Amino acid sequence: MTMTVTIDRLPTGVPGLDEILGGGLPEYSFNLIGGPPGCGKTTLAHQIMFSLATRERPALYLTVLGEPPLKMLRYQQQFAFFDVDAIGESVNFVNVSEDASSGDLEQVLRRIVAEVERHSPSLVFVDSFRSVLRASSSSGSSENSQQLFVQQLGLLMTAWQATTFMIGEYSAETEANPVMTVSDGLIWLRQCVERNSMVRKMEIKKMRGQPTVPGLHTFRISAAGVEVFPPAVSAALPADDADLPPIGPRLSTGVPGIDDMLGGGLPRGYSVLVAGPSGSGKSILAGAFLSEGARCGETGVFAAFEQRPTTRRNRVVAELIAQGSVGLVDSRAADLSIAETLRLLTKEIRRMKATRVVIDSLSGFELALAPTFRDDFRESLFRMVTAFADTGVSVLMTSELEDRYTDLRFSPYGTAFLTDAIIVQRYIEVESRLRRVMAVVKVRGSAHSDELREYSIDADGIHVGDPLPDQEGLLGGRPKERAKQASGKDGS
């Protein structure tokens, strides 16, 4: 009879980290948290420790630092996760720098054994573990001695049933170190500066016995501590049928004429791109979309990437936010990622139990991203839209277009393919006056109007008029050329 061993997983207490780990940290595992100076290794270790440590599961933090532990603790106390009452109770700090500085690995091992026997911890942290090996190297210890030391330490920790974390300043060039082989888990942190943006990323290089989410995952250090942002697909809201609104009539956009052009409204769970030049009424339509939802008892979320809604700018949305019918996501961080944005939106959608989301606008969204994330903007945006579509949330996105008066384009980002519906707004010149016109380019899986309709904007919102007459040159080209443009051959 074959017996399967079950390995319990410990929740780290770090938002987003358990998701990319594949469910948490394996209990009794031997882990390395590595990365360059200043990337957040010690902060991550402390956050995990204070989250997991209890009287029944005490933690031992061994410091091998050139500075006193009290100095380190003074800075760590600034984070919300730090619990002063836990010090000396469920969390114990011990300075072993004197033993480590001797360079005698056997002496270091004896000291660690003595402290473990004294405190009987379930969680053990050694910071900085690389300092121990560096000190031994300067004292003439061979690589074989270091390998033996790491192996013995790993075996002892497993025998004591302690979940262990080695913290050290490692880089890609030091991966031949013996600790890499012995470790059950390798959590790698890195950071880079681009222009005025500081971007931090995390990679789970190894975690024995469980599938992890591959790739680099952005994270942020705030007053609350470390927060990791999984990719859009894995961070999607749970699609629980019981929590989703029933599939019924289409959603009204709040503008009857546009509903008619869409074939009766926007199908629930669809994403729609509203593209047009400045002043064409994109934000007004977005406000009408959320206002109609509130009228029908639905809540919404407004993600502002250009201007925060106020009584002077987008008054309708500002009033909905003040009434509590719409939640606001308004991050002013200069180094956003798509994954972080999705996390912010997801939290607000869950809080509001929202079924309608507006992103205003994609142009501002791209500018809000750190430069390193702009190259894969289309791919990441596709993942985010797909994640929302899978949950039944209806999304309206606006996109700024440069109106050249002579051609019909849908999006400067080539994002037209990822939305279920597209509404294009533009200007035309008739008798030396600019007139606003709009068209529904597509509604996936549904019939829709193919007419160009003039519309006007006043204090009551958008009003859609009758179809435009078929006048030669109205769109800056002959009828055949206009048909070609409207068919989607716009280069996007």
Image (tube, rainbow, N blue to C red):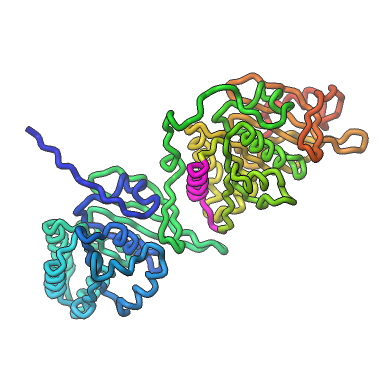
Residue 143 among magenta residues: no
Q: How many marks?
A: 0
Q: Nearer the viewer, residue 486 or 94?
A: 94
Outermost residue to the right: 431
Q: Is residue 442 above or below residue 162?
A: above
Q: Is residue 75 above or below residue 35?
A: below
- The answer to whether residue 271 is left or right of residue 351 is right
Q: Which quadrant does the N terminus fall into?
A: top left
- The answer to whether residue 98 is left or right of residue 302 is left
Q: Which residues are magenta?
A: 334-352
Residue 341 among magenta residues: yes
Residue 200 makes an appearance in the image: yes
Q: Is residue 117 above or below residue 17?
A: below
- The answer to whether residue 486 is left or right of residue 271 is right
Image coordinates for residue 95, horizontal then vertical, percent: 23, 76
Q: Nearer the viewer, residue 85 or 4?
A: 85
Image coordinates for residue 374, horizontal then vertical, percent: 56, 50
Image coordinates for residue 32, horizontal then vertical, percent: 27, 59
Report which quarter residue 316 is drawn in: top right
Name the residue at 67% across, 50% down: 309
Q: Is residue 476 above or below residue 189?
A: above
- The answer to whether residue 484 is left or right of residue 222 is right
Outermost residue to the left: 1
Outermost residue to the top: 447
Residue 485 makes an appearance in the image: no
Helix, strand or loop for the magenta stretch, by majority: helix
Q: Which quadrant does the C terminus fall into?
A: top right
Name the residue at 19% across, 58% down: 56
Image coordinates for residue 200, horizontal then vertical, percent: 45, 59
Name the residue at 23% across, 67% down: 89
